[in-house]
Amino acid sequence: MKILIIEDEKELVGTIKNFLESEGFLCETAYSYFEAEDSLSAFNYDIIILDLTLPGGDGLDLIKLIKVRNRQAGLLIVSAKNSLDDKIRGLDMGADDYITKPFHLAELNSRIKSLARRRHFEGANELIFNEIKINFDSAEVFINDTIIDLTKKEYEILLYFIVNRNKVITREAIAEHVWGDNISYADNYDFIYSHIKNIRKKIEMNNGLNYLHNIYGIGYKFSER
Amino acid sequence: MRLLQKTNRAYFLISGTAFIIAGVVFYFVISFFFKDQLNEKLMSDIKVIISTIKRNGTLPNYYPFIEIREVSVQSERSYETVDILIFDAIEKKEIPFRQISLVDSINGKKYFIAARDTLLEEDDLLEAIAIVTSSVFILLLISLYFINRKLSLNIWKPFYKTLDELKEFSHDKPGFRLSSVSKLDEFTELNKTLEKLTQKVISDYQSLKRFTEDASHEIQTPLAVIQSKLETLMQYPDLKKDQAELINSAYVYTLRISKLTQTLLLLTKIANDQFPERRAVNLSELLEEKINIFEDHINGKSLIIKKEIEPECFLETNFFLAESLVVNLIGNAVKHSITGGIINIRLDKYHLEISNPGKPLSVPALNLFDRFYKTDKSSDSQGLGLAIVKEICKLNKWEIRYEHKEDLHKVIVNF
């Protein structure tokens, strides 16, 4: 899966690139409007990450170009302006999703995987990890083919973990993913803790393994260990 | 006071005074000339009488206008002018007369000759002058009023148009122009100056807006870099506990700055009215939806939510701002409520009321909506939630107030 990252901050691009490559994506970069124009004209991409504030031109103009040259690509807009106008205009012009800078890498990863799912695995609406199976259409989770009863938030958290497996996820990233960015109270940690406790219990009740590990002082990691 | 009213009042005062002075002067001038004329006439009358007596030897006598009688005084007396009152049998009152008299010897006899004529009665004269001056005065006022009205309609028309256009002026509408044209230099100049001023306001505003957005962008980008580096650093498998704690602490504070910048940008944007898209927002639905977000917090504190939400309450406003208002108010109530408390949420077409039981405020209620005002200094909340709520209310011209009764904190928004 090929991703084009259009973003002028080289340090940020580097980190995003490393993170996404560790997730198995093939990444190319463009640091300016013109580089982006060149890359978009020459190659096809599956997913494009576009920062709207670019040197050399308006990011919104690039959307038009993408819609002509790379119509099948999934388009994720990134901007520091948490301006609703840009968001609405971007989505109106055909962007698939929108993420505000600064973002959690895990959140970016989750958005990209969701885009990729929608683009490439039409019909294949399942994600399987060892004994865990997730059906996206029905939002159901199976352990060893037995359905387990998760609340909406537990489902969201589990999915977030599986999509970001083998990565350390901070409590803040989980909180923002589940509750949005309008609530960020420190006492969210307790709710995350109790949701995760419930998920573990429900998986173990159906003879699933505990893949959810505490990372001291930071958060959690979903992995086989 | 309208300009027309003011000028009319001034005209009235000035012309009133002028007419009173004119009336007085008029009175004295008229009576002077009249008396002068009368004297001349009476003098010539006496000359005619003397010559008549000399010629005819008869004594004409038309009392009270001419009176001649023989007198036996030694010396001749020259002309003598007096004003006297003579009783008129017909009018049955005393009438003022001017009399010019002379003692002269004609044909060897001495005669007292007096010629008289009625003087104008003072009050008649005054009355006449008063009638004339006041009717001219009233006529003048009426015409002034109509001329003024017409003038103000015509001359001031461009001015009022300019005024109306200025009322519509908004600093975020570039290309603002005044359309009224006036032949009067003053108004042309006024419009030119106003246009220059408004252009300046618009360009200043634009650059301030650009600055705020650029500054926020410039801050957010390094923060995004720091945040992503720290998240990458966290991925190292052999982190020791104390290392992890250091990273996490740096991470949490980075997130805090980033959140703060975003919130300040939001406040600036609300204050600058940069949320132009307005539509009918279903506040009832929004409220229910946002209460659900706080489900965990509500259960965690064993709070009871009592809702009295009238369905289908629509408000013409910006959706994002309405959302922000609701989330901040509910969040605030949930956060400051005591464990096991009852939160009342009431909504109808005209108000939104949210109340929660809690400790008495440790700060004056007046400052509650100020930026960075925290009831608890050690709390890691930004102290910006209610400031945002206040700005949103101000922008929408909603009234917001806080009440405190028997440990119950209540915030009321009147739409």
Image (cartoon, rainbow, N blue to C red):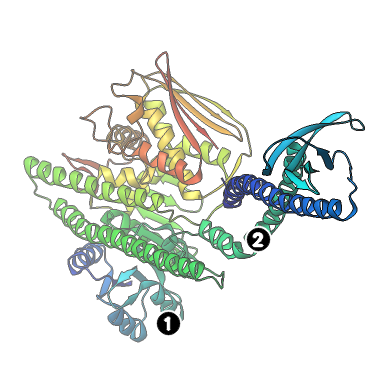
Work out whether residue B168 or residue B290 is closer to the camera in this orientation and state it: B168
Instruction: Give the residue displayed 47% in from the left and 36% down from the top.
Output: B292
Q: Name which residue type carries label 2.
A: Leu
Q: Quadrant of residue B199?
A: bottom left
Q: Quote the CA–CA distance across marks 1 and 2.
A: 62 Å
* Label 2 sits on residue: B153
Q: Residues within 10 Å of mark 1 (few under 14, many from 20)?
A: some
Q: Are marks 1 and 2 in contact (CB under 8 Å)?
A: no
Whole-percent x and y of residue B413? 50, 33
State the image coordinates of residue A105 (x, y, percent, origin top left).
Answer: 26, 56
Name the quadrant containing residue A70: bottom left
Residue B40 visible within the image: yes
| Image quarter hosting the C terminus of chain B | top right
Left or right: B300, with B345 as reference point: left
The residue type indicated by label 1 comes to Arg
- Residue indicated by mark 1: A69
Residue B107: percent from left, percent from top:
81, 49
Q: Secondary structure at mark 2?
A: helix
User: Looking at the rendering, in which quadrant would you find the N terminus of chain B?
Assistant: top right
Residue B41's label in the rendered image is none
Protein chain holding label 1:
A
* Left or right of B233 on screen, residue B43: right
